[in-house]
Image (cartoon, rainbow, N blue to C red):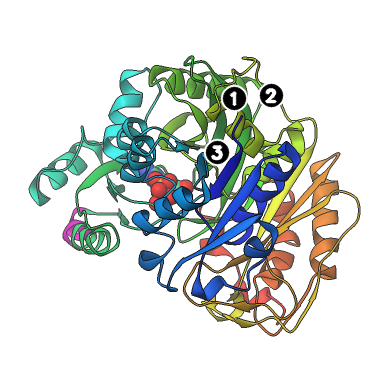
Amino acid sequence: MFKKILIANRGEIALRVIRTCKEMGIKTVAVYSTADKDSLHVRFADEAVCIGAAPSRDSYLNIPRIIAAAEITNADAIHPGYGFLSENAEFSKICEEYKIKFIGASPEMINKMGDKATAKATMEEAGVPTVPGSKGLLKSLEDGKKIAAEMGYPVIVKATAGGGGKGMRIIKTEADFKKGWDDARQESGAAFGNDALYLEKYIEEPRHIEIQIIGDSDGRACHLSERDCSIQRRHQKLVEETPSPFITDELRDAMGKAAIKGAEAIGYEGAGTIEFLVDKHRNFYFMEMNTRIQVEHPITEEVTDFDLIKEQIKVAAGEKISGKNYYPKLFAMECRINAEDPSNGFRPSPGKIINLHLPGGKGVRIDSHVYAGYVIPPNYDSMIAKLIISGQTREEVIVRMKRALEEFVIDGIKTTIPFHIALLEDENFKAGNFTTKFLEDFDFSKIKK
Ligand code: ADP
């Protein structure tokens, strides 16, 4: 087992990894930017190294500085968390070269799955159903138009390097094709330095349902059931739950089997997520694979009694999985609390937290790095806490979530808490009746200020 793990991340996920390491008797090294010098991950780690200035490229994305920090502290493994370098093939390769175990996917695997068009082709070959679309990348605007005409509108053009909902456009008619194409290319070129696009049939009113998997170094994989992440704003998740109110036992089995088939076909090692779109007829299609731990992993932990970070570390150290699958024994839901103003178009609201009271009680878990007096730097993402609720039934979870949100006090900044309360009062949401389009039609004026 590893003796010391460096965590190449910040915020709640850095703390999350430190917690598991402590329970496993593994020493930890935090790295931080000057903007994060007062952060809890810096305080709670056994050692901490400042790696540069606030902009991510000078610190959390700066590979030479992170490797230097691992070398001087003698860390034998690096946990990348999510975002930043977690799906960076070059970083994974450099760790290999320096004989530091990267607790994540191999460079080959990241390359295969990071490029979304290639990932789709790989899964198709493995026999996993995928969204109908172009065979690989679009060669030109005309090529795209031709495929779209054959397939029928609406279609969606997507950046092969995409992530975080960026670089995709829905196109409803041929007359709109050029605009969608230009916008998606422009956005993906700016965000990812790669403007290559592929095209898919736009699945109308789908659910986003993903399967958590773990694979070991023998190439064996198991699944830990699904998470329903259909509550999204601008293709970004805001609420996740498990089990999905839409899924049947048969569908869970079929999707679980497909996910395992996909993971085993590429010999996937570590924790990963296979994301599917599910249409109203309960047909499911592979969308993409994430080769890292995800923000919403705690809901799976709450219903399966599993520590996913611990599993990641164990598999990285060479331990084998049992091979059995895990099914939800409870219900769980996560609300992402962001420093954003939901009554004002979700405008970022960084600043100082004056007063903080965290909810508690049965079935309440909070993963967060903030405290009273904490100043949220404007440089990083706006998520400041994850409120994770578990219970015996979905109804119990919703009641408990609302109770916990009402107990939550964060003074000094705006947060998404009022949005979540309004959502939990929505009759369709309560009935489990929603798709990824749900928030497009949501009445945001219902949100109490
Ligand atoms: P990213 O990697 O940027 O998160 P994804 O490929 O995971 O992008 O897609 C994000 C979201 O966009 C999905 O959860 C879904 O809501 C929507 N989406 C993507 N592809 C399609 C499609 N073919 N049809 C309908 N919606 C889609």
Task: Mark 2 and mark 1 in contact? Answer it, CB < 8 Å.
Answer: yes
Amino acid residing under circle 3: Ile
Residue depicted at x 79% and y 65%: 405
**Is 441 or 387 nearer to us in this picture?**
387
Label 3 neighbour load within 10 Å: few <14, some 14-19, many 20+: many
Q: Secondary structure at mark 2?
A: loop
**In this view of the protein, which residue sits in the foreground, 119 or 130?**
119
Residue 134 x, y percent position in the rendering: 22, 36
The numbered mark, 1 or 3, whose residue comes first in the sequence reads 3
Q: Residue at x 13, y 42 (%)?
A: 146
Magenta residue span: 174-178
**Residue 326 bears which disc, if any?**
2
- Residue 156 rendering spot, x and y as whole percentages: 31, 49
Query: Going by the image, does 342 lie left or right of 431?
Result: left
The quadrant of the picture occupied by the C terminus is bottom right
Q: Is residue 132 visible?
A: no
Q: Amino acid at mark 2?
A: Tyr
The residue pinned by badge 3 equals 209
Q: Is residue 71 above or below residue 393?
A: below
Q: Tag 1: residue type?
A: His
